[in-house]
Amino acid sequence: MNRRAYPSDVDDETYHFLLPYLALVPEDAPQRKYPLREVLNALLWLGRTGAQWDYLPHDFPPKDIVRAQAKRWFEAHCFENAVHDLRLFTRVQQQRGGEPTAIIIDSRTLQSTPESGHRAGYDGAKKRKGTKVHLVVDTLGHLLTLMTSSANEQDRAQVKELCREAQEITGGMLEVAFVDQDYTGEATQAAARQSNIELIVVKRQDASRGFILLPKRWVVERSFAWLSRFRRLGRDLERLSSTLIGFHFLAACVLLLAKSKPFLG
């Protein structure tokens, strides 16, 4: 009997595109007991719903199988590699250069849970205990790289590593990074210059109140909103920060595939 389909299940076109990235061993390897596609569907279901591993429906492969395969995918950067290629493809389709010359950097704080509480910190500005996710996107809002830190750490402390990774990913094409006022300071500027990137602080007018659409800065806020459609990313539900990062790249991969699908055929 065929199991019922879930809205998160991948279609044939998506699966065939992702298969070269996900097949760490041959698909018909003798040690494989469950179809790779079913394991992927289970992981996507968890990402979409944010449910606990124990609540994985029984018509998916067992949770231990899905968890172990997800760990192998995340450690091998499978979804990260797919995101990189999809970003290049999407930019070319929109008549942009394959690699960006400008990025936007920002962070958000995810509420901690009992699973993640051992590495949580208190964000005084947000009045929340949790984990900060530091995001780097291009000017189209597509993910380049990200990292996590305790919520009590300053945003500017991550600039050096974020710029280094982003510059490496783009092959040294980056020239500027747009940031908010939390990244001000000569030390922060100097950290970015080590990667040949100029920080441009987009400031909010002192007298303004309420929501203000800031040039360039709104793009990364939209990226956070896109990622928030995956309930797994609504809080820090992971024991390991590497798993949290992996689920972000999984979500980014799904979002880019949806945008690229009209051209993949």
Image (cartoon, grey):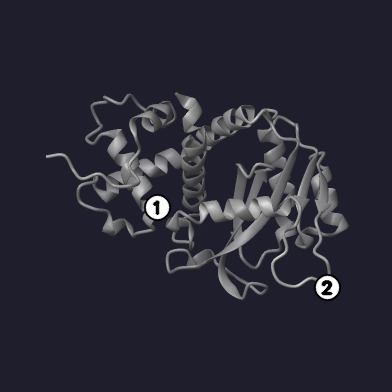
Where is 206 relative to 138, above or below?
below
User: According to the image, label 1 marks what residue?
Assistant: 48
Along the viewing direction, whichever of 181 and 207 lies nearer the viewer: 207
Along the viewing direction, whichever of 235 and 30 lies nearer the viewer: 235
Tell me if 256 is positioned left or right of 19 in this view.
right
Residue at 61% over, 61% down: 108
Where is 227 relative to 236, above or below?
above
Disc 1 crowd, CA 10 A, few/some/many (<14, 14-19, 20+): some
Residue 233 at least partly seen: yes
Task: Give percent across and percent down for residue 127.
Answer: 61, 76
Give the residue type at disc 1: Arg
Give the residue type at disc 2: Ala
| The image quarter in which residue 231 lies | bottom left
Residue at 58% over, 32% down: 90
Where is 128 relative to 7, above or below?
below
> Image quadrant for the C terminus?
top left
Disc 2 crowd, CA 10 A, few/some/many (<14, 14-19, 20+): few
User: According to the image, label 2 marks what residue?
Assistant: 207
Q: Could you say whether the residue bearing mark 1 is in a helix, strand or loop? A: helix
Task: Give percent across and percent down for residue 180.
Answer: 76, 58
| The image quarter in which residue 125 lies | bottom right
Residue situated furthest right in the rendering: 186
Q: Could you say whether the residue bearing mark 2 is in a helix, strand or loop? A: loop
